[in-house]
């Protein structure tokens, strides 16, 4: 009785992997503002097949990026730990790491700016990354490695700016993100004058997402 069902199960798993693989490729090139129908076409499966496994784009995003967000959170925690002895190096390398990840995968750039997307595991890893980033910033500031009026939400602002730069210059200047990052790191390190206050909306969002840790 079990024999006829085995090929179906194998086919189902092949379809699932084909969908995830195609989604990863589409997301990297086009971002998350795509349709399940588009991904089904790329995967070579029927629309009904993709909807049975992933009823929304958000559900598919969560599965595709769970492991990537886990590595992202691991990197943030490693940077926070390193900041205890090498605050500037830890901060600067982490900032460029985030920007490089955005440049390498447009969809990942989308999802780190929309932490509500994805599965619960994905969201928990996002919260872990945020908590580690807050600790990294706190340690860098305590050591005098970044300007006193720097706020952790400035990294969120930087990611938004970088996302726009990547989309606008992806083909003509694919390494523009690196030059932009170098400019911004110099600004973060040296105070030359007062800044506009951070966005109140972003400050509240950061407070809701995770405690400010010092």
Image: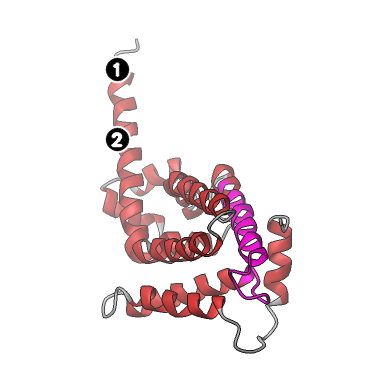
Query: Can you give x and y, in whole percent of width and height, for residue 100 in the image?
Result: 39, 64
Q: Nearer the viewer, residue 210 or 41?
A: 210
Q: Residue at x 49, y 75 (%)?
A: 185
Residue 16 lies left or right of residue 79; in this view the side is left
Q: Residue at x 26, y 80 (%)?
A: 172
Residue 102 lies left or right of residue 77; in this view the side is left
**Residue at numbered disc 1:** 4
Examine the structure image and report whether residue 138 is included in the region drawn in magenta.
yes
Residue 87, placed above or below residue 163: above
Query: Can you give x and y, in whole percent of width and height, for residue 19 in the image?
Result: 34, 45
Distance in Å between CA atoms under marks 1 and 2? 17 Å
Mark nearer the N terminus (1 vs 2)? 1
Q: Secondary structure at mark 2?
A: helix
Residue 209, placed above or below residue 30: above
**Residue at numbered disc 2:** 14
Residue 154 lies left or right of residue 94; in this view the side is right
Q: Which quadrant is home to the C terminus?
A: bottom right
Nearer to us of marks 1 and 2 is: 2
Residue 174, placed above or below residue 63: below
| Range drawn in magenta | 125-153
Query: Can you give x and y, in whole percent of width and height, for residue 96 in the image?
Result: 43, 66
Examine the structure image and report whether residue 172 is included in the region drawn in magenta.
no
Residue 50, placed above or below residue 175: above
Query: Can you give x and y, in whole percent of width and height, for residue 56 in the image?
Result: 49, 52
The answer to whether any part of residue 44 appears in the image is yes
């Amino acid at each position: 009785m079990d024999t006829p069902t085995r090929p179906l199960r194998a086919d189902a798993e092949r379809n699932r992997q084909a969908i995830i693989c195609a989604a990863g490729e589409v997301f990297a090139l086009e971002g998350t503002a795509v349709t399940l129908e588009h991904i089904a076409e790329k995967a070579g499966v029927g629309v009904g097949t993709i909807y049975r496994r992933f009823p929304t784009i958000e559900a598919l995003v969560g599965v595709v990026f769970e492991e990537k967000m886990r590595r992202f959170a691991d990197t943030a925690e490693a940077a926070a730990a390193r900041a205890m002895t090498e605050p500037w190096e830890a901060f600067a390398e982490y900032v460029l790491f985030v920007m490089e990840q955005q440049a390498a995968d447009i969809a990942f750039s989308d999802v780190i700016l929309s932490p509500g997307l994805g599965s619960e595991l994905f969201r928990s890893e996002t919260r872990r990354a945020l908590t580690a980033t807050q600790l990294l910033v706190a340690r860098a500031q305590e050591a005098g490695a970044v300007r006193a009026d720097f706020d952790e939400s400035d990294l969120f602002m930087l990611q938004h700016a970088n996302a726009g730069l990547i989309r606008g210059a992806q083909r003509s200047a694919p390494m523009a993100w690196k030059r932009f990052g170098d400019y911004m790191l110099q600004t973060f390190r040296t105070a030359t004058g007062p800044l506009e206050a951070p966005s109140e909306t972003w400050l509240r969002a950061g407070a809701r997402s995770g405690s400010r840790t010092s």
